[in-house]
Each structure stands twice: as C-alpha cells, then as structure tokens.
Image (cartoon, rainbow, N blue to C red):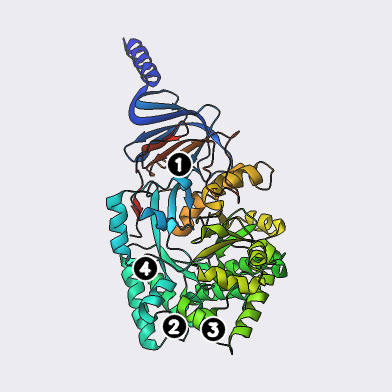
C-alpha cells in the first residue's frame, strides 16, 4: 500500500512537470536572434509582451503561449529599440503633422532626446503637454538648454552675467528640471551659450546636480577656433568635477585638419578623468561631415553678438568690416576651404546643393564676402567635410561612446545614422554587433538616467525592434538626405506595433519621458 502511494506520487509529480505552463501575452516574438542590450553574445529567445511591458523572456520551452499576435523573427535580429541621445527632432515633434518622427523610426530609434546644443523649447512644461496632446511617434526625453536660459535672462548680450542674473538663471534651470528635464545641455560653441564663462556654467550645473541630472555639452571648441579642442574637453571635465555631475560630450569629433589625430590624447585625458571618479561619456555620429549654420560655422562670435541685425550693422561699419572678413576667411580655412562647405539647406533654395566656392564664383566674389550675401537672404545650413576616418573609428571603439544622430535637416545623419553605423562599421568589423547594439540602447539609457528602457528584460518597457541583418542600412546621402533607411522589419514602442513588415502604420505610440 505504502509503495503504491509513493508510485502514484511519483507519477503525479512527473506528469506535473510535463504539464505546460499556459501564458497569455499580447505579442509573442519567436525564433529571432536576441541581443538583449547588455550581453556580449546573442541568444535564441522568445519574448512575450503584455500591455506596455516585456512580460516574458526565455527559451519558450514547456510554455503554452496564447497570443493575440505572433511575430516569427526567423533569421532576424531582435534588439531593444535604439535610444538617440542627441537630436533636433523637437522642430518636427511640436508640429502635429510631423510628430510621427519617421526619419528616426526607420532607423530603429524608439526614443529621442531633444533640447541639445544649449537650445530647448521653453517652458518645457508647456511643450511636454503639447507633445502629449499631439501624440508622438517615438518616445521623447528632454534637456534644458543653457543658451535658452541665458537668452531668457540676458538676451543675446555677450557680457558676463551678474550674480543676480546667475541666480535668476539657476531658478529657471530648476523650473525646467521640475518639468522633467533629464539634465542640461550647453552649446558653448554657439551664441549666446558661448558668452558664458566656465564658472557661470558650473553654477547652473550645480542646480542640475541637485536634481540628479546630467551635463550634456557641445564643446566650446571642436577644432582650432577659439580655446582649442583639448582645452574644451578639459573645460567639460572641470564642469563635471566642480559641479559633481556626469558629463556627456555630444558628437565627439576632431573637426578640421589642425586637430586630426587628437583623438588619442583626448581618449587619454577622458580616461584619466574617469579614473579620478568623474563620469565622462560621449556620443558620436558616423559621418565625416559635420553640419551647422553657415553663420555659426564661419562668423566670429563677437561680430554676431546681439543677433543678425547687429552682425550686418557691424559689417557695414568700415572700421570693423576688414577684421570681420579676415576672421571669416580664416574660419573658412579651418573648415577645409570654401569647396568643402556644402549648402544643404537654405531659405534661398538656389543655394542648396552648391558649395560656398561655387556660389562665390557665380557671384564674382571672394568666398568670405559671399558668406554675407548668402546670410542676407536668410538662414543657410552647411555640411562641412572636416573629419578624418582615423578619429571616427578611434572614438567609436571606446565603450564610453554611444551612438547619436545629431539629426537635423539637410544632413543624411537624420535619416541614416544608426543603420549606417551597422552597415559601414559593424559589417566591416570596426566594432562588433553586440557592442553596436549595447552602445545604442542600455548604455545610452544608463548615461541619460532613463529607467526601464534599453534592455530586453522582464518588467521593462516593451520598446523592441526587429531588423534584417542582410538589408539593414542607410540610403540617405548628401545629394538626397531625405531617404528613409531600410531593413527595419518591426518597431514596437511601449508594447504597440508602429512598423510592421517594413511599413509604418501611422500610430503615435511614443510617450514623453520625464526625470522623476
Ligand atoms: Zn551640437
């Protein structure tokens, strides 16, 4: 009798372990090669999504799934959605007709950061509400721009801030941090950010520190324009050290022949700071051309203080004009020459697609004089071919450098960054696929302080992309920078499908992400 009971018990337990667990999920993703955003090797895993979260990650063995949607990812890469820490997508996101954020979506980006380079929409609380009511195609996180705050308090004046003005700026930074900014950005190369001393920036960074935010910077000099690239990196580190907060250097690069191959010494300086306990990281876009406003690229800051009108008043002044033209000519040389400056976007469409040299020739002017004819017709943006492959690869290989697009109109990076990095640098073996994915997902989330995203893990938000390793790549180039990338099969944002079999379904599944 006793034996019988034991045998029955064994049978019962045996049957029990064979019985499959029944799990209900909304979306099941199976048969894919899963890179979870953290590990260095992929796994064959099944993902179950419920609501806006990842509810199951495992082998799927002994599981009986019931799913509303099953995605067979055979032959595909499954990854956390990419996080882009430096974009200018705010220009589109605030417009309900463009808030789908398609250029980024097709790169596999599910979260963008806006408010970079010291310039943010103000006040944040209002814009965050606007994004929410319009709906957004990707998640959006915010930075408060130091240039914007300075302008609110001091206009475009190039003078030093008084103590009272600094206190007022600190108050406004606090207000924007309260509204959910992840940190503060600076554009110390650009006016009016460039007029701020290191001390002024440190005072504001201390407010950010109290709110556990980060300091994101477009360096004061990425080349040999003013203080020099090395001094600019040291300034960023000093700000991080004195204000005791993490420093994130945006679009790290060696801009212009004069500073090529300085990446080696910069890496040493940054890693020494890291050893001393300063948390320094950087982001980078995988292109040899930078892009910025023509004015920012070649006009000296003192000459534009006060804005465009002030610039043209000074230019008309016979005592100042020779000096302005002289410095503009020097800056054109620093950018590699007038033939290396391509107008990619302009209020005056005839300039687009031409180099500064070509336009100057057509006008019968010297290049430095042509600059003012172009600026007189309105805004003009230039792509400037001024980076060396050596430095690009050198920075890319560092585990503290993550992917960013710096996406703005006219440069192919807005449409191509993430797939291009895969196509050009992963496929050729400069970096491996896991490093590429980890440096576009979890490491970025970590740097920015974005919780529960960037990793495929149970309990995390279901931002998941699926791409074809054969075809994933960029198509945008300088001639046609508006071509969507290809090879993305699925994009799932907050548990909802946005891209399906390579086609966008028009849904606005993004959310605003706030520093809480
Ligand atoms: Zn920038």
Q: Is residue 469 left or right of residue 97?
A: right
Q: Position of residue 382 (x, y in %)?
A: 58, 62
Q: CA distance from mark 2 to mark 3?
A: 20 Å
Within 10 Å of disc 2 (Cα), the crowding (few <14, some 14-19, many 20+) is: some
Specify whether 472 is left or right of 64.
right
Q: Does residue 31 lie above or below 289 as drawn?
A: above
Mark closest to the chain's N terminus, 3 or 1: 3
Residue under numbered circle 3: 316
395 or 471: nearer the viewer: 471
The quadrant where residue 290 appears: bottom right
Marks 4, 3: nearer the viewer: 3
Say whether disc 4 or disc 3 marks the residue closer to the N-terminus.
4
> Taking 510 as reference, is 150 above or below it?
below
Marked residue nearer the N-terminal end (2 or 3): 2
Image quadrant where one finds the N terminus: top left
Element on which disc 3 rests: helix
Q: Which mark is residue 456?
A: 1
Sequence-wise, the earlier of marks 2 and 4 is: 2
> Residue 99, image x and y in percent?
37, 49
Q: Secondary structure at mark 4?
A: loop
Report if the beta carbon of the residue with label 4 is closer than 8 angstroms to ligand 1. no
Rendered location of residue 155, percent (x, y): 39, 79
Q: Which residue is mark 4?
A: 211
Res 281 visible:
no
């Amino acid at each position: 009798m006793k034996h019988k009971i034991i045998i029955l018990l064994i049978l019962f337990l045996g049957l029990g372990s064979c019985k499959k667990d029944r799990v209900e999920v909304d979306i099941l993703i199976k048969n894919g090669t899963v890179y979870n955003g953290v590990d260095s090797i992929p796994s064959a895993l099944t993902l179950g999504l419920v609501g806006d979260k990842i509810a199951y990650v495992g082998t799927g063995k002994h599981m009986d799934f019931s799913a509303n949607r099953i995605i067979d990812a055979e032959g595909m890469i499954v990854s956390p959605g990419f996080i882009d820490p430096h974009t200018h997508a705010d220009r589109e996101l605030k417009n309900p007709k463009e808030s789908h954020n398609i250029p980024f979506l097709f790169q596999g980006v599910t979260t963008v950061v806006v408010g970079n380079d010291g310039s943010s929409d103000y006040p944040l609380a209002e814009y965050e509400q606007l994004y929410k009511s319009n709906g957004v195609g990707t998640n959006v996180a915010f930075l408060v721009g130091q240039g914007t705050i300075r302008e609110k308090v001091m206009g475009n004046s190039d003078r030093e801030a008084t103590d009272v003005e600094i206190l007022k700026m600190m108050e406004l930074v606090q207000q924007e941090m309260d509204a959910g900014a992840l940190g503060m950005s600076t554009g110390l190369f650009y006016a009016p950010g460039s007029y701020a001393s290191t001390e002024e920036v440190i005072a504001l960074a201390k407010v950010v520190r109290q709110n556990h935010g980060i300091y994101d910077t477009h360096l004061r000099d990425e080349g040999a324009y003013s203080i020099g690239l090395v001094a600019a990196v040291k300034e960023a580190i000093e700000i991080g050290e004195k204000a005791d907060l993490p420093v994130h250097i945006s679009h790290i690069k060696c801009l212009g022949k004069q500073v090529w191959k300085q990446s080696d010494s910069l890496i040493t300086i940054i890693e020494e700071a890291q050893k001393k306990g300063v948390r320094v990281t950087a982001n980078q876009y995988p292109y040899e051309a930078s892009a910025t406003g023509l004015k920012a690229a070649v006009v000296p800051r003192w000459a534009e203080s006060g804005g465009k009108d002030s610039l043209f008043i000074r230019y008309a002044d016979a005592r100042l004009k020779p000096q302005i033209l002289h410095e503009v000519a020097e800056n054109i040389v620093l950018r590699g020459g007038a033939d290396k400056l391509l107008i990619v976007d302009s209020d005056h469409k005839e300039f687009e697609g031409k180099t500064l040299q070509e336009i100057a020739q057509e006008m019968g002017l010297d290049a430095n004089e042509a600059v003012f004819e172009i600026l007189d017709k309105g805004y003009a943006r230039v792509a400037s071919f001024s980076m060396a492959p050596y430095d690009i690869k050198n920075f890319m290989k560092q585990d503290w450098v993550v992917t960013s697009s710096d996406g703005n109109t006219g440069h192919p990076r807005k449409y191509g960054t993430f797939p291009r990095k895969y196509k050009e640098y992963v496929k050729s073996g400069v970096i491996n696929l896991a490093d590429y994915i980890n440096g576009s997902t979890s490491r970025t989330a970590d740097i920015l302080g974005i919780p529960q995203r960037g990793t495929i893990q149970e309990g995390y938000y279901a931002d998941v992309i699926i791409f074809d390793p054969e075809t994933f790549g960029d198509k945008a180039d300088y001639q046609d920078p508006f071509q969507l990338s290809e090879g993305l099969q699925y994009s799932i944002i907050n548990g909802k499908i946005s891209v399906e079999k390579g086609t966008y379904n028009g849904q606005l599944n993004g959310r605003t992400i706030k520093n809480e």
